Amino acid sequence: MFRNSLKKKLYAGEVSFGTFVAINSADIVEICGIAGFDFVVLDGEHGYISPETSLPLIRAAEASGMTPIVRVCENSESLILRTLDVGAHGIHIPQINTVEQAKSAINYVKYFPKGTRGVSFHRACGYGMYNINEYMEQENDETLVVFHCENVLAMKNIDDIAATDGLDVIIFGPYDMSQSMGIPGKTNDASVEEAAQHMLKACQRHGKIAGIYTNDAISAHKRMKQGFRYLPVGVDCKVLSDTYSELSKSLKNIKL
């Protein structure tokens, strides 16, 4: 049975840095772990990662000392169940915009008495070798639950969402929020920043951890100083494309 070092660190008041991985590659995950990230978010919403294909990526994260979190593509009972059964230490659930959606998500993640998650003997349960009652209690305690705040509707309901029992983290999505506001891609717009700060304050009022996606270390440190503590920085495909593009340009500029 796993112990969630990321969750422990966050509730101790510390800041944690992670990154998104959208490419279905255990090698990339392992590199991120060796590099020293606290956690990885395996992207099953925009990346081509499913509960089945996430398994070797989860193993690679665990083997390299990094907490594996999976972002599912929707607030689906069966999808959340299967993702946790293969061993994710936490789950990102997108587009949580109402308190009803928030409560249903918690219900899908948690075992009785906190929810109605289905029980079976799977990898997360040690393939049936763990004591089932101890396993379910530990899953309820250790699994990190992360809701995405990325829609203007979520902003209207943010206090009710943040008050949801069983929720650990709300993460602000600047790009989706900008699109929801009708200003797609303008993540530096004052209205997007105002929404981010509004979500942060709601988290603080209700004892939840605030997170936000950033593209680089400078932005991440700025957010850390504001009070955000769950900080995924960058996504593998963009990091790779930027790095190789810069390398290619540098090579082509070499004068013989």
Image (tube, rainbow, N blue to C red):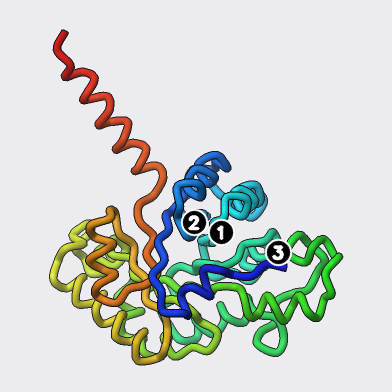
Q: Position of residue 95 (x, y in %)?
A: 43, 70
Q: Amino acid at mark 2?
A: Val
Residue lying farthest to the top in this orientation? 256
Would you name the residue on which mark 3 appears?
85
Residue 47 percent across, percent down from the top left: 48, 49
User: Is disc 2 in contact with disc 1, using a CB cutoff of under 8 Å?
Assistant: yes
Q: Residue at x 59, y 70 (%)?
A: 4
In depth, the one of 161 and 121 nearer the eye is: 121
Mark 3 crowd level (few <14, some 14–19, many ≥20, 10 Å Cα): many
Residue 40 is labelled as 2
Numbered mark located on residue 39 in the image: none
**Label 3 sits on what residue type?**
Asp
* Residue density around tag 2, few if under 14, some if 14–19, many if 20 or more, within 10 Å: many
The residue under the point 52% across, 46% down is: 29
Q: Whole-Å distance between the Cαs marked 1 and 3?
A: 13 Å
Picture disc at residue 68: 1
- Nearest the eye: 93 or 244: 244
What is the secondary structure assignment of the residue under circle 1? strand
Where's residue 119, x and y in %?
Answer: 78, 73
Which of the 4 image quarters holds residue 231? bottom left
Q: Residue at x 55, y 39 (%)?
A: 27
Q: Nearer the viewer, mark 3 or mark 2?
A: 2
> In screen coordinates, is 179 left or right of 124?
left
Q: Quadrant for residue 156, please give it.
A: bottom left
Mark 2 or mark 1: name the one nearer the start of the chain: 2
Which SS class for mark 2? strand
